[in-house]
Image (spheres, rainbow, N blue to C red):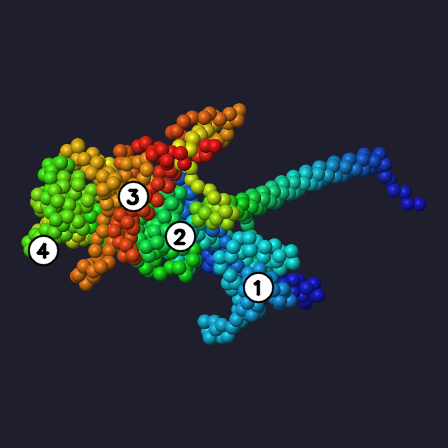
Amino acid sequence: MHTGNDAARFRLCVLAGLLVLFFLYVTGRLYYVQIVRHEHYYEKARGKYVTSQTTRGTRGQIFDIDGNLLVGNMPCQDVTITPCNIKKEHDREVTALLCHHLGLPAAEVGAKVAFKTRETADASGKIITKPVQYALIARQVPLEKARALQTALRERGLLPGVHFQNTTVRYYPKGQLLSNILGFTRVEHDQAIAQMGVEKFFDKEIKAASGQRVYERTRDGRPLSETPLQETKSRDGLNLYLTIKEPIQAILEEELDLAVAKWHPKAAYAVMADPQGNILAIAQRPSFDPNDRRSMNPEAYRIRITEDVFEPGSIMKAVTVAGALDYGVVTPQTMIDCGQGRWSYLGRPLTDTHGYGMQDVTGVIRKSSNIGTAKIALMMGERKLDRTLRKFGFGTRTGLPLKPETRGIFPPVNRWDGLSITRFGMGYGVAVSPVQMLRAYCALASRGKLPQLRLVDRVEDPATGEVTRNPVQKPVNLFHRPETGEEIVKMMITVTEPGGTATQAAIPGYHVAGKTGTARKIERGHYVAKYYGSFVGFVPAEKPAFVLLVTLDEPKGRYYGGTVSGPAWKAIAERTLKYLDIKPTVPLPEKKKAR
Amino acid sequence: MNIQARTVTNRRPARRRQSSASGASWGSTFGKLLYLLLLAVTACAIFNYRVDLSRRESELLRNINQVKREMSELDLDIQRLRIERERLSSREYINAQIARYNLKLRPPEPDQTRHLTVHYRNHDSRRTRSGAAVLREPDSESRLSLNRR
């Protein structure tokens, strides 16, 4: 007989059994979720609340040798919004503030702020509505403007949904100064891509390495914890210090601009180095302002000074004569018959502007006689002339960190024709770049020591302050006779003295050693009535502080090197001597002293 | 009359024994409770301390990050001001200002310059304690160009 107690006990047993089963199920499920599927669910959750942020270092800066900034990074901010996080009732106010501070059209900004959701198809093709997380409002907003906007938004409680991302824009504080050499960058996908000049040549060193920060985030995207889960630090690019001296560069560019304004040449170059080959200043016209993209066109920004070649004309004569002196072919007193200004060789005439008659070698240089130089070259012979010009670096690149760089045009001796020997020595039939000619004159200035041109002095790691110097290569000794250097310099001094071709380049109080050059241009294989007018020299001749080359391509009106480039050379050199505080080496005339 | 024989004397000690036994058990229970309470309080204190430590740590981290943010903002300002200074010290800008104010400035002649070298006693701080400067002739690092009157 079943009593009421039995029934109750039975029900209790069933209930207990069910409970045990339920707990067994829960335990099993827990085991499955927590142990068996742990990795799966953990990754799924991580994907939801763990996010990563790319951090960027800043691109290296470029300085002159004394630490004056030539290329820097101007800090600014990108303004973006998360439209779905901006409350609908705030749309109008946020739009108004963005437009007011950033000067943007209201319709455009309003549309971006109001665009809060978008419809998209999921994997199964079902249309779903997704919140819009990102819209770019303005790029590279100046820091002050961005901060004013941020303050205004914060004061009104409208900051949620508006983001300010720190970034930088490449900035050239000196404007056009040295622009062709420095080069420029363009921005692509928030990355600076180097385009030209030093920026491009040293891109690998200057470029910053980006880092990554992985962190847990809240629903609205803010970091949940102050310490990230994982972090790879970004690295700033290395800083470059050039051998350029900014004040001298400014002087050189100002005077070059004046020469360009006076003679209206098609192009103009000026480059200055110390006798050890350190480039102190370098400029070309036309040029551009890297901060103003409208002024940029290939004709303005290509680096003519290393890329272009020109027939140097008479500025080559000093090199030829130096070779002849060193080989002992001539002495400064050797007399050369320059005739009446006209001479034929292999049936082809060669002329001088005047008939100079009998001249010693110094006179040949002073008067810049083509006939005299051609005769000296003939006395040397092809091999010696070829060896001399090649020793001075013609036909080889200078190795400046600028691309592209030309080797110039200087055919090997076995391809010379009969006339080459009389033409190459006076700078016709060969083509050189301005920096090749500068290097050759650095060798003359240092009495036969051919230096390696340097444009970069040192590289600095901004993180550690570690400085790596660009080593100075040992110069190559060119002269066999120790007297050659002094002899050729003395001849070149006469060029700027009364009776020389470049009296306009003379500087009171200093001995200037130099050489003028006027070369006709070739167009379609024929010489035309267009000229290169050059002057290259160094001062003080006794102990040169610098070597300077000025070349005007197709000057209008006059074209003689001594007339068009000489005065510009003098102006640059005079101001540079003052800047470098080089005391006069010869007594000043009384009138000058009194001033 | 129902008379029950009771051994009163027997019962009394028993009651006394019982009451003393229950007193002992209450005492030990109380002791145990106290012990448990102590344990709980200690655990709570440790837990609270740990929570407080975490809170302080996170607050400190927040402060550090805040200071870092402020420092980076100051760095940005320094960077911006440095670029601005470089722009204002460019020859182009200076020449424009000279022309604007018609200052008629010209560079000094070489014989109009004197070299002034300042040797700092404390090289790290670049300041001299006594504030004295030593004047030396040419081969100087820092050079000032002075016009002779």
| For discs 1 and 4, the disc positioned in front in the rendered view | 4
Q: Quadrant of residue A97?
A: bottom right
Q: Which residue is mark 4?
A: A348
| Mark 3: secondary structure | helix
Q: CA distance from mark 1 to mark 4?
A: 75 Å
Q: Residue at x 36, y 33 (%)?
A: A590
| Element under disc 4 | strand
What residue did someone put label 3 on? Answer: A505
- Residue type at numbered disc 4: Arg
| Label 2 sits on residue | A176
Q: Earlier in the sequence, mark 3 or mark 4?
A: 4
- Measure the C-alpha gap from mark 2 to mark 4: 47 Å
Among all residues in the image, which is located at the extreme right? B1
Chain for numbered disc 4:
A
Viewer-nearest of labels 3 and 1?
Answer: 3
In primary-sequence order, the first of circles 3 and 1 is 1
